[in-house]
Amino acid sequence: MTALLPRRGLAQILALIVILAVDRVVSPQFFDLRLQDGRLFGSLIDVLNRGTPVALLSLGMVLVIATRGIDLSVGAVMAICGAIAASLADSHGLPVVLAAALGAGLLCGLWNGFLVAVLGMQPIVATLILMVAGRGIAQLITEGRIVTFSSPDLVWLGNGSVLGLPVPVVIALGMLILTGAVVRGSALGLLIEATGGNARASELAGVGTRAMILSVYVWCGVCAALAGVIAAADIMGADANNAGLWLELDAILAVVIGGTSLFGGRFSLVLAVLGALIIQTMNTGILLSGYPPEFNLLVKAVVVLAVLLLQSPKFSGLAGIAARLRRTKA
Amino acid sequence: MKGLPPVLITAIVLVAGFVLCALQFPNIASTRVVGNLLTDNAFLGIVATGMTFVIISGGIDLSVGSVIGFTTVFVALAIERWGVPPLVAFVAILALSAAFGAAMGAVIHVLDLPPFIVTLAGMFLARGASFLLSTESVPITAPVYSTVSDFALRMPGGGRLTAIAIIMLVIVIGGALLLHLTRFGANVYALGGSRATASLMGVAVGKMTIKIYMLSSLLAGIAGIVFSFYTSAGYSLSAVGVELDSIAAVVIGGTLLTGGQGSVIGTFLGVLIQGMIQTYINFDGTLSSWWTKIATGVLLFAFIALQQGLVALARRPVAKSAGAAS
């Protein structure tokens, strides 16, 4: 399990602590927790709860990015699966609803994976197709309306609690442990990293790169489906236009903040989820501080730029040149 | 002659689609409808022209929709609140958006980062900045706006070729000339073919990258001004998702997303195809607007699959000889 918590996560943990401290300054009650009706309440729980969809998406996205791919369609897949879950919720039991929604996510992932792994399309292009068409499909399912439901089982998925924690948080935690156990408990994670590092070399070395790429997109689709069901359960309805809108960008951002390179290779599940939490902590902090939520985008842009600077292969080189220049001047 | 076969296919799809539409609704085949189609898609045509350059050079620009949104808000506020003459406001915003594009190009080149993530940051930045300026829709009442909106060339059959449609056509033609007839255009292709090769051949890769993203943002700025003419207002949420529409138009127009091949004319045809689908759905009345997205997605898939097939065909002899050598 040491692979799950690498030492390189220090920067992310420090960043989270700094942002939490800033949040504490703008909102003195930030760390307050209280137990009510067997459930914890407070800003921290709120951060965890609201961060769940992006955290789930980033779990799938980080594997896709590790193979040097990208999945732009996760937001649209969320909308599709949320729509399916909402339209089935009142007529079928929870198992059927979940199976249908997750099955749809699996199919979406299979489609993306097929385009990338079998037809050899560029990932950004291949997933663009579903990103564009997916929202249309979701609207087809909801017939353009916002489908609402009252099935207590499905509502529990979004608003219930287990051992004081909101159900979405427990689900996300479960998925993190499950994904971690599968990819790090076996050689799978290593093979995925090998595929991203150099697909051709890995193939020659006997790695089934096609199967690897196909399966990460399928997993990404399933994670997106789960996020979509939770998002729908949270608002007790499916809004095909707005469910998961722009969340693909947040998920990619979370992965990048988590230190996984967009050029594939080494990845970390825990840090990607931590990245999602960092984003959500910032969002909540901005909301609590009373600044207009519009600041979110500006702050995010600055964060992306900062992370990019730190990750840039040239940055260390530039720093070296600057140091040398200073030395020659002096 | 680069990219001609895919362009031909795009043209055939457009003509065939138009004939099918016209058979079902004879009224579609009128200059009135075509004129409206050009007006409604003027900003998309302009922004897609810039996107064509970026994609042929092997990059992508996700920030264009946000730049359009920022431009409309900036222009509206400058004219209505700050009392700046419209022309000065236009020059200022064009300079600003060109500088924005140049900055993104510089970051992409100097820090050697994927254009996707840099322009994503640019997208957040421009959209956030427009939210900061104003979150409400600001109507523009300057006289120049009503003059431009009223101006139109009469076409035979009662159609109106509006000022913004003319601006779009001029930019498309200018873009086509720039891409196909100048050294700059040749360098764009070279960059998309292979950066390393282009650099060895003496193309100033850094300068070109900066210029290409500058061009894309500049055209997005112009598209923003055109959009403000179109809606007579500035709104920070306008043109959300236009980057996707323009990328789709570029791909449907036969430009290779890996770079190195494509044409501005193809992109223009791609914009027209999207406009035609929208027009058909409007005429039909029973179909919902979400069919536009599905149809665009299907077309995207068809064209990308086609490109993939063409590329595979083109590479086959190379792969064979490489196999023989090893």
Image (tube, coloured by chain):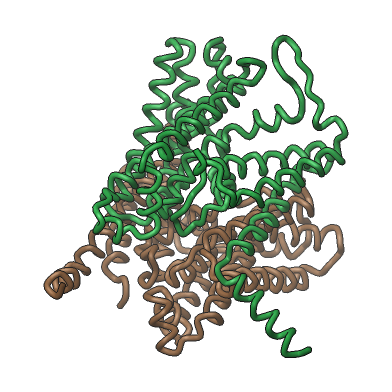
Chain colours: A green, B brown
Q: Is residue A321 above or below residue A117?
A: below
Horizontal arrangement in the rendering, residue B224 relative to residue A285 (left or right): left
- Which residue: 62% across, 18% down? A159
Q: Is residue A33 above or below residue A246?
A: above
Which residue is at the front of the view, B204 or A321? A321
| Image location of residue A321, percent across then percent down | 65, 81
Quarter of the figure with residue B13:
bottom left
- The answer to whether one can see residue B306 in this image is yes
Kindly give the residue lying farthest to the left in the view shown: B324
| Image location of residue B149, percent across then percent down | 65, 60
- Which residue: 19% across, 65% down? B313
Number of disc labels: 0
- Which residue: 50% across, 33% down? A79
Which residue is at the front of the view, A103 or B274? A103
| Image location of residue B265, percent across then percent down | 40, 69
Quarter of the figure with residue B318:
bottom left
Q: Quadrant of the C terminus of chain B?
A: bottom left
- Which residue: 40% across, 88% down? B201
Horizontal arrangement in the rendering, residue B22 relative to residue A14 (left or right): left
Horizontal arrangement in the rendering, residue A14 relative to residue B185 (left or right): right
Q: Quadrant of the N terminus of chain B?
A: bottom left
- The answer to whether one can see residue B229 in this image is no
| Image location of residue A226, percent across then percent down | 48, 28
